[in-house]
Amino acid sequence: MTHLFNHHRTAKLAILTGLLTLGSGLANAQSPHCTVLKGAYAFTQSGTAVFPGNSTPLPFFIVGIFTFEETGKWTQVASSNFNGLVSRAVPGSGTYTLKPDCSGTMTTVFQDGSVHMADFALSKRGKTFYAIGVANFGPGNMTTIVANKVD
């Protein structure tokens, strides 16, 4: 039994090593060059949030449109559902930075003055956008965003 376990473990490590090597080679062969983030992206956002006076993370879902300007600014209009509390057509805005490797950070300043940051990555030649919240709002607060360029 131990021999069979070691065989499976060795096979898994070999596959993982091969994938890491392949991924590294592909990354070098296809190094992206992102210079601009511009235009409209339809997005969905989901996660959990802990609100003042409550220690239980509550789910939320958002759908909307981001519009990115070449100047490093963005705006949005979005509708949300925070555990049953619905808001529609809410505007928002912020700034972003984009690195040549197609990764970046976007910052949002909310109406209450709080600041939220998300790290993002572009794929499919800038047509798809993935982000994850990186602001330290404490345990139970998390968000992910997926966006696609509007043609």
Image (cartoon, rainbow, N blue to C red):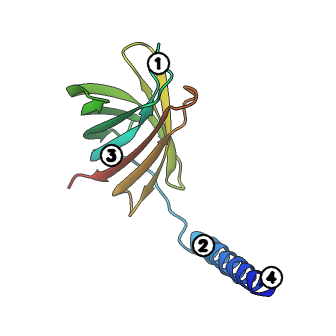
Q: CA distance from mark 2 to mark 4?
A: 31 Å
The answer to which image quadrant residue 74 occupies is: top left
Sequence-first disc among 1 and 4: 4
Residue nearest the observer in this picture, 6 or 133? 6
Mark 4 Cα-neighbour bin, 10 Å: few <14, some 14–19, many ≥20 = few
| Dot in front, 2 or 4 | 4
Residue occupied by mark 4: 2
Q: Secondary structure at mark 2?
A: helix
Residue 54: give its label. 1
Relative horizontal placement of residue 136, taking residue 51 as reference (left or right): right
Mark 2 Cα-neighbour bin, 10 Å: few <14, some 14–19, many ≥20 = few
Task: Confirm or deny contact between disc 1 and disc 4 (CB under 8 A).
Answer: no
Q: Position of residue 60 (x, y in %)?
A: 35, 34
Residue nearest the observer in this picture, 100 or 66? 66
Q: Amino acid at mark 1?
A: Asn
| Dot in front, 3 or 1 | 1
| Dot in front, 3 or 4 | 4
Sequence-first disc among 3 and 2: 2
The answer to which image quadrant residue 83 occupies is: top left
Residue occupied by mark 3: 38
